[in-house]
Amino acid sequence: MSVLVYTESENGSFKKIALEVVSYAKAIADSMGTSVTAVSVNGGNASELGAYGADKVLEVSNDKLNNFNAEAYADVLAQAAKAENAQVVVLSQSANAKFMAPLVAVNLEAGYVPNVVGIPESTSPFKVKHSVFTNKAFSVTEISTAIKVVGLGKNAFGLKESNGGAAAESFSPTLSEDDFSTKVVSVDKATDKVTIADAEIVVSAGRGLKGPENWGMIEEMAEILGAATACSKPVSDMGWRPHGEHVGQTGKPVASNLYIAIGISGAIQHLAGINSSKVKVVINTDPEAPFFKAADYGIVGDAFEIVPQLNEKLKAFKAQNA
Amino acid sequence: MKILVCISHVPDTTSKINFTDGDTKFDTAGVNFVINPNDEFGLTRAMWFKEKQGASVHVINVGGPETEPTLRKALAIGADEAIRINTPATDGYSVAKQLANVVKEGGYDLVIGGRESIDYNGGMVPGMLAKLIDANFVNTCISLEVNGTDATAIREIDGGKETISTTLPLVVGGQKGLVEESDLRIPNMRGIMQARSKPLHVKEAIDANAETNTVVFEKPAPKGAVKLVDNVDDLINLLHNEAKVI
């Protein structure tokens, strides 16, 4: 028996979401009286996971798995789940984890619940709360299969340090040609920018900025804060910013610690997408903008006056608190 | 090429979300249902394959008779035939099993679904379907070309995109990018008239139990009022000392 957790790495070290899913798996394992086994594909140092509660780390080292491949990775995880007699399999909600989780679930004939927001309300029967209707509601859902697959929303649990042994073991899955019938030909990823998925802070702007030429101050704020940049739907539809920056119901979800919305009125579809961010700040000229009802802090005023001031003060603040 | 587009029947994006029956059922009163936006991008791309490459396009939904207007809209946009599997869509896994049965029988080369439905946000049906029928799978697909049995897809990843080469049979989880917002089609009167006489097949469901069931729905706790400040120093101070996020 065990709780199995899939841990993602980048450039040889574990991502923060990997530490979060391990923390979460540890909490489930404790309530079930069992242990945590992590699966790491060409990943970081096992002891990093031990610090958050992993008892064992199955290390898969295979050059064929250098590029993410959902089918092959799902096979690795399912084989590990069987070898470890896992009752619960935990993944994050990164793009890759969302890609592979349904494949893992079918492989294990397991019910799958994504967008989970907390530890299970009970483990027998297994009931867990997750967001639905793009954060406009939650569902407490019971999974009735023998094995359960859950996808933990980013920032939904946080990091909890705990001492697991993290005994590293090499794991060699059986992979076939079929696992590689989709091939990655090329990857186009900005390596010098924080992604919306990984960002602690997201700086987002909308039509209030009047044109794409005015995004310099937004990018500057993002750079000062180490944040990702994002935008509203109309801005991406008009081609002012790339689609990948569109956040909202039909765009990307944002679950950052801080979301700063500049010149975005706050249409219901936009608010749904950013609802799981912890702290929301809005800067808008219109005091009646719906975003003010959804925000924690706000300034009513012109972005073209406020943002440059804010950038100067943030720079000074960062210099002082570095 | 035979294409099947999976159409989820969902509340439009402006809907108020409420529940009935002791918070166990979604309250459909006054709710306007539409084609799931992610599916509509896929349907529109399918129309391109129909017009440029002579593909046939069928659309499918798992649900009761109330979903038929949504399927008729897909026919009015230009799909050739529609299929409704006559059973409530209870969870992603059981829906995928229902679809797998039809895809196997129908010999489809390409199945296009949405990255996720905007109601339950499961994001699992296309992937589960692909695994069940042993087809290739590309999720968060933002571009798709098919040449013979070879397919080239671009997938959105966190912080960028990647190009994937694969083969049919293929299932994709699509989203905006497959076509642009401006490419979406509003059915015209001719399309609407034609849709009335296009086949809409109702199929009985196979035995497939839901493996996940909602026990109860909850609404988020009401939010406190916004704190308005009139200068950036106060804002930085609050974010640092009160919210502790910078």
Image (cartoon, rainbow, N blue to C red):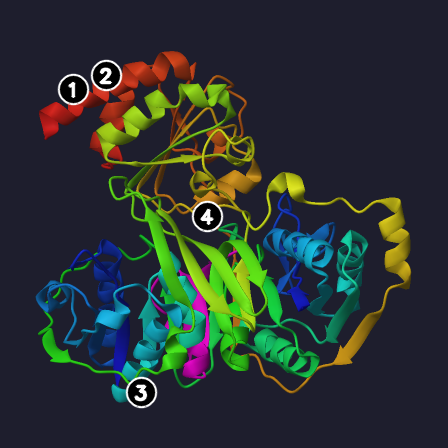
Question: At which x and y percent is residue A162?
Answer: 13, 65
* Chain name for mark 1: A
Question: Mark 4 packing: few (<14 Cα in 10 Å), some, or many (20+)?
Answer: few
Front disc: 4 or 2: 2
Q: Position of residue B29 (x, y in %)?
A: 73, 54
Q: Earlier in the sequence, mark 3 or mark 1?
A: 3
Find out whether residue A109 is within the magenta segment: yes
Q: Chain of mark 2?
A: A
- Which residue has dot 4 on it? B221
**Residue denoted by label 3:** A82
Query: Horizontally, is B4 left or right of A275 in the view?
Result: right
Q: Secondary structure at mark 4?
A: loop
Look at mark 1 in the image and give the residue it sits on. A316
Q: Secondary structure at mark 2?
A: helix
Q: CA distance from mark 4 to mark 3?
A: 39 Å
Quadrant where the N terminus of chain A sits is bottom left
| Picture coordinates of residue A184, whole percent (x, y) | 37, 62
- Disc 3 to disc 2, C-alpha distance: 55 Å
Q: Amino acid at mark 4?
A: Ala
Task: Tell me if residue A110 can be seen.
Answer: no
Q: Earlier in the sequence, mark 3 or mark 2?
A: 3
Residue carrying label 2: A312
In the image, are marks 4 and 1 on the same chain?
A: no
- Marks 4 and 1 sit apart, C-alpha to C-alpha, by 36 Å
> Which residue type does callout 1 highlight?
Ala
- Label 1's element? helix
Q: Residue A30, how many percent across, how many down?
A: 22, 75
The span picked out in magenta is A105-132
* Residues at discs 4 and 1 in contact (Cβ within 8 Å): no
Contact (Cβ within 8 Å) of mark 4 with mark 3: no
**What chain is tagged by disc 4?**
B
Subunit ID for the residue under disc 3: A
